[in-house]
Amino acid sequence: MTHESRKTRIGTLAVHAGQEADPTTGARAVPIYATAAYNFESTEQAADLFALREAGNIYSRLMNPTCDVLEKRLAALDGGKAALTFSSGMAAITAAVMTITRSGQNIISSSSLYGGTVTLFTQTLKKLGVEVRFFNPDNPTEIDDLVDANTRCVFLEALGNPRNDVPEFRQISSIAHQHELPLIVDNTVLTPALFRPLEHGADLVVYSTTKYIGGHGTHVGGAIVEGDGFIWTNRPEKWSEFCKPDPAYHGTVFAEAFPDSPFLAHTRTHWLRDTGAAMSPFAAFLFLIGLETLHLRMPRHCQNALEIATWLRKHPDVEWVNYPGLDDHPYAERVKRYMPDGAGAIIGFGVKGGREAGAKFIDNVKLASHLANIGDAKTLVIHPASTTHQQLTDEEQRSAGVNPEFIRLCVGIEDVEDIKEDLDQALKATR
């Protein structure tokens, strides 16, 4: 049974969407289709597949049945029309931007971003001739001053990592759409269990499935979900990628051939085809297992995080705590409005004693794992200024909410009392 309707609740979609029992074997779990290529029924069918006149499997760089189930499930969870998986979250972000952006053009991005995304935007895209212009997400009207005829999209994170800021989505979406630009939202930190960007004005959603989607730190992956709110055909001269005949596919007009999801149809048959950043079927299998418990894990993550944040604020060795789920957080009102089911599991806090004390804290945790990841079932800690954000300037670090003493704590689903005990002994070691 498939569950495409929005009336079906998220817990059911997370377990069933996009899948039928395997027609050949009757297998109930999604099989791992470990194949590079697929038999064609005839030369005519092969020609139709390659010309995009018929839907089907050609080569696993473009599509794979295991990945297909994951794509359909992600689209259902977010209320999107389609999804496309990638080998990593960074590959998904790159494809989302570069599908509609060429050398000499620009995009506008929130300045509150994961460090790897900042590096992609300020270094790698610059080498490709794409300019990224940054706006303060607390002042969305800055977008108006940054837009020009060559601007292609607006990009932001649903919850800034690690600044923990919550954008005013409706206002930003309205401004982007006034300039006839799509809004791309990275929803990695919240997932559709806590927030669905398409319901608040986003047009495309990107994920690092490595994080909470998978939930167990077992594989790297990424995805893009396409909504149906942005009408590319309103400006056919601007969005020629979708509205004009494509010479690579015998003059196919993607907006006509794929009216529900022209963006991802184009991304699959161009960017994914040519860069090869495809998700493996084994990775998709692991992410599908993770998705089945997403709606159960995320409430526990949020519950633990809120209790730990409240506890840390009272700890004598902690200078400050940044968690948007706290009632007096600067973004508490937006959390209640946009994320009533929880504010995620990432806590930022400063250890008394500065950078040296922070290093001692990290060196003394035992239950928590010191590594460069978020979204694991396990509790994770890292010092962003010297690791994930070390490539940024001091000004860029401050803009992202990273201070020298800042510790990023990604609260897991262990027993919360055991997490407290571990953090307490590590904090005492900093004295």
Image: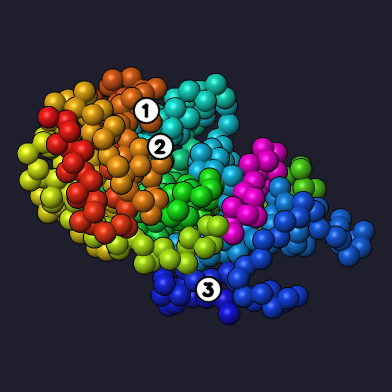
For the point 77% across and 51% down, the residue is 36
Side (left or right) of 3 relative to 144: right
Numbered mark located on residue 387 in the image = 1
Residue 251 lies, in percent from the top left, at 76, 48
Q: Residues within 10 Å of mark 1 (few under 14, many from 20)?
A: few
Residue 265 lies, in percent from the top left, at 64, 53
Numbered mark located on residue 372 in the image = 2
Mark 2–mark 1 distance (CA, rounded to whole Å): 8 Å
Name the amino acid, label 3: His
Q: Is residue 407 above or below residue 269?
A: above
Numbered mark located on residue 307 in the image = none
Q: Are marks 3 and 2 in contact (CB under 8 Å)?
A: no
Q: Residues within 10 Å of mark 2 (few under 14, many from 20)?
A: few
Q: Nearer the viewer, mark 3 or mark 2?
A: 2
Callout 2 secondary element? loop
Task: Give the magenta-colored segment's residue range.
Answer: 261-285
Residue 89 lies, in percent from the top left, at 50, 43
Magenta includes 326? no
> In which quadrant of the rendered image does the N terminus lie?
bottom right
In depth, the one of 104 and 9 nearer the eye is 9
The mark nearer the N terminus, 2 or 1, is: 2
> In which quadrant of the rendered image does the C terminus lie?
top left
Q: Residues within 10 Å of mark 3 (few under 14, many from 20)?
A: many
Name the amino acid, label 2: Ala
Q: Are marks 2 and 1 in contact (CB under 8 Å)?
A: yes
Name the chief secondary structure element in magenta: helix
Look at mark 3 in the image and give the residue it sits on.
16
